[in-house]
Amino acid sequence: MGSQENDRAILEEGLLQNESNGLYTGDGSVDFHGNPVLKQNTGNWKACPFILGNEGCERLAYYGISTNLVTYLTNKLHQGNVSAARNVTTWQGTCYLTPLIGAILADAYWGRYWTIATFSTIYFIGMCTLTLSASVPALKPAECVGFMCPPASAAQYIVFFLGLYLIALGTGGIKPCVSSFGADQFDDTDPAERVKKGSFFNWFYFSINIGALISSSFLVWIQDNAGWGLGFGIPALFMGLAIVSFFSGTKLYRFQKPGGSPITRMCQVLVASFHKRNVKIPGDSNLLYEVQDKISAIEGSRKLEHSNELKCLDKAAVISDAELKSGDFSNPWKLCTVTQVEEFKILIRMFPIWATGIVFSAVYAQMSTLFVEQGTMLDTTIGSFRIPPASLSTFDVVSVIFWVPVYDRFIVPMARKVTGNGRGFTEIQRMGIGLFISILCMSAAALVEINRLELARELNLVHKPEAVPLSILWQIPQYFLLGAAEVFTFIGQLEFFYDQSPDAMRSLCSALSLLTTALGNYLSSFILTIVTYLTTRNGQPGWIPDNLNEGHLDFFFWLLAALSFFNLLLYIVCAKRYRPKKAS
């Protein structure tokens, strides 16, 4: 107890110093040793290159595996199209589900720095295991002989998927923490640094796509032409560099202390409000319980202003007669602060916005699965050069790299004149535009597939598993539109879930935003399973057979376009009802 009081005294002293001379941060951040930090010596853009370098290398490693994974599963592990697509989306979904583990550990116990460091090591071990599975002869599946492709052994499957899911676990401590840790380097109480924080998110996503660009072009070519051992080994090397880059900036970082388990705090609100379910809520919200200190009772969190929604939860902050007489307000399972109640309210208010991101993520999942399988049935040659189908995702990355500066330099200034908003669009508006563009993306993919199937019928290739003489470059529009949708939706989500989340729940809220990607991948797998079941009855080949010339992949793309349209309508309704948080 004494240690907590000392920490609080130090933090309040730092806040006072910041107000008086502006030398210290005012958001409660500390240095590596737990002391208040001087602005000019830490954080800001001085610390960000190490974080951006870590993210760029880690994303290069991740996309070096995921971009062409469906090809490895079909060509090396000899899986069918549906099975391979399902395995990829399930693994990718897991990569975006494990961040819940890392987020809880970061917010409650370890802090973002040590969570990133620990899980990066697990990630690196997984990369090395995967490299061994593709390099050691005994661990590699046998090559096909003609049309005879012997299945991989149980041991080969185990080693391969062990490495794959160690990577999935490793991402759990990195994805929810790196963007938040980078944003922590900018003081929320300093208007100048808040502006720089908005720029950080754009550069953060830019670094992600630089890594993805190298993976989808250079690494895909290495995997298809120089072998998978080298193709997996290079990403493992870059993951090692990511760890080195991260540790190199330790002295410059600003740290936010973990505020205790957010899950526990939410449970306390539920228990306390249920315990006082018969208590009347006072008409004046100032009568609800809140600590009188300058900062809130939650470590690393500012106070939150009371809101009028979800008033049933306010009962957790009502001071009972017994508590008033005893003067004992120390049991959080019976009495919670307004800030603690508002934390829970914020998560509930964010939920509808969060849920509408799932369908968008299902659309995004097609880039590394069915878009690649569609590309294998198109003409991949330009002169004497053959384009690996997975490398078409380069155009998604190029689109992102193109749209980020265009958005910053041109769209925002024009939008600012119309909306009057300093950022051009609010995060809500930005995400909505991305959802609309995703409909155009799936429509473009469906139109390409319609033309491909018509050509297959004209050339009598329906029952032959051969590519049609239609250039793979016709896929560029769907990738380019998907990249534009990313810039609006994914970067908008990064800003939304950081800015709108409670201070002590930022890792958790980042993980929840990533969870939409996990659920989107699982939704894609689920839709694939249902569609395959319904369309292959009575001996029919189905929409997505191993020979796509016999199927109707265009129907599947139109289905996703329709789901995206209805999802946009739901999003508009939810966005109109959303009320942003207010911190005091």
Image (cartoon, helix red, strand yellow):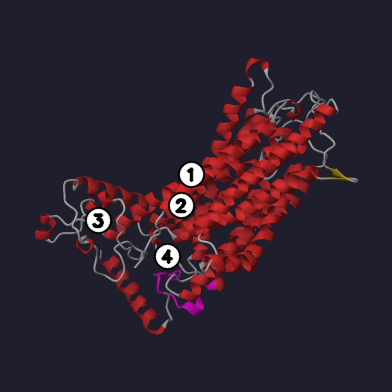
What's the CA distance linking mark 2 and mark 1? Answer: 9 Å
**In the image, what residue type sits under mark 1?**
Leu
**In the image, what residue type sits under mark 2?**
Ala
Which residue is the extreme one toward the top? Answer: 538
Residue 136, visible in the rendered structure: no
Q: Which mark is residue 575?
A: 2
What's the CA distance linking mark 4 and mark 2? Answer: 30 Å
Report the predominant secondary structure element of the magenta stretch: loop
Disc 2, disc 3: CB below 8 Å? no
Q: Nearer the viewer, mark 1 or mark 3?
A: 1
Image spot of residue 544 (x, y percent): 68, 29
Question: In terms of image quadrants, where is residue 338?
Answer: bottom left
Q: Which mark is residue 336?
A: 3
Horizontally, residue 448 falls left or right of residue 458, namely left
Residue at the spot of label 4: 256
**In the image, what residue type sits under mark 4?**
Gln
What's the CA distance linking mark 3 and mark 4? Answer: 22 Å
Image spot of residue 487 (x, y percent): 61, 56
What's the CA distance linking mark 1 and mark 4? Answer: 36 Å
The secondary structure type at the circle numbered 1 is helix
Horizontally, residue 144 falls left or right of residue 235, namely right
Badge 4 or badge 2: first in the primary sequence: 4
Which residues make up the magenta segment?
A: 26-44
Residue at the spot of label 1: 570
- Badge 1, how many Cα within 10 Å: few under 14, some, many 20+? some
Q: Nearer the viewer, mark 2 or mark 3?
A: 2
